[in-house]
Image (spheres, rainbow, N blue to C red):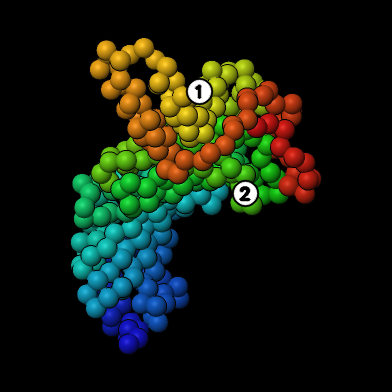
Amino acid sequence: MTAAPLTHHDILALVAPFTRSGRHVDLPACDRIQRRVVFKPQERAAYVPELHGLQELLALEKTGATSYRLTRTLVLPSGLKARLETTGSEPADLLRRVDAVPLTQHFQMGEGFLVARHYALRSDAQSPVLTSGVVQVDGLMLTMSVSAVRSVSADVLVAAPPGQALDIPQDLLAVLGWAWSPLTSGKQGWTGKFRLRGTADQRTRRAELGLQRAAEFLAQTLAAPPAAFHDQHLAARWRAVFRRAIPILTPILLLITLLVMPRLPLMDHASAWTLIYQLPTVLIAISFMTQDLPKFEIPPWPRRASAASWLRPRAQNVAPTVD
């Protein structure tokens, strides 16, 4: 059964608490059929002086007979946005919850980068839960999408400015640590994973720290020539190679273990035999702990890039110069 559209009287009743807070409904922008009430944009740069031109957009949707969703969208003049969503049965309560989250929580600025974070207010979390985040570095965009499922890693997408393509190594982010997977080139950009575990609040904090670290790292790395990445992170690149090789090394080490065990003079050392016997299990466990879905591959060796820039025109069909 199709839900009844909002009437003019319904809209006036819903917007009362918003009007008292200084928000005013934008009647032409409202969608009565979709039961969506939109409010006029408000300047919010005074609350965040470093973000000139920041605007707030509010939208209230009636999602059920007595349920609502309130979305606050903060928009910068560049078009970069940060959202906050919450659901409940009382619009006035939703507004109080949204206003309690500081605008500064959505953005982080640093030398050469800007981070925008999207949150949701959920009943199972003590504070706003990160749903996604965007890192902007000189036109390059890194997007991290955080799943609501506890054991699922966040999806990472690194995209070039419009009309350009990225020439980056697969281990560009993997050098940051074991939580970051190698990147894979695709139509939309370079995709990867960021490992997250724990409760919703723990995952949010780890994702926030991951975004901050990635932003600082990309701002520093992309400001230098591509060849400098190899020189500065050579040890970390080899650690990333070893991590990628773990899945394929596992069956090789298992085979070596089976071949060597009968030849080892350890008949009288029960503890040593127990350790060797458990080695296959440990190797398999490590293989699955390093990534969500182990990939059996021979990882490319790190090489110094020969390109002069991290970017190239998208129309120019040139193979990546680094692995």
Which residue appears at 28% of the width and 80% of the height? Answer: 10
Q: Is residue 44 visible?
A: no
Tell me the tag on residue 321. Answer: none
Q: Which of 210 and 134 is in front in this view?
A: 210
Q: What element carries label 2?
A: loop
The image position of residue 311, as x and y in percent, is 69, 37
Which image quadrant: the N terminus?
bottom left
Nearer-N-terminus badge (1/2): 2
Q: Nearer the viewer, residue 7 or 81?
A: 81
Which residue appears at 54% of the width and 18% of the height? Answer: 235
> For the residue carrying disc 2, how many other residues have a C-alpha within 10 Å: few (<14), some (14-19), or many (20+)?
few
> For the residue carrying disc 1, how many other residues have a C-alpha within 10 Å: few (<14), some (14-19), or many (20+)?
some
Q: Which of marks 1 and 2 is in front?
A: 1
Residue 60 left/right relative to 244: left
Q: Is mark 1 on a helix, strand or loop?
A: helix
The image position of residue 229, as x and y in percent, is 61, 23
| Amino acid on which the number 1 mark rests in the picture | Arg
The image position of residue 292, as x and y in percent, is 42, 43
Which residue appears at 39% of the width and 15% of the height? Answer: 264
How far is the residue under mark 1 from the one under mark 2?
A: 24 Å
Q: Mark 2 points at which residue?
A: 186
Q: Is residue 221 visible?
A: yes
Q: Mark 1 points at which residue?
A: 239
The image position of residue 236, as x and y in percent, is 52, 21
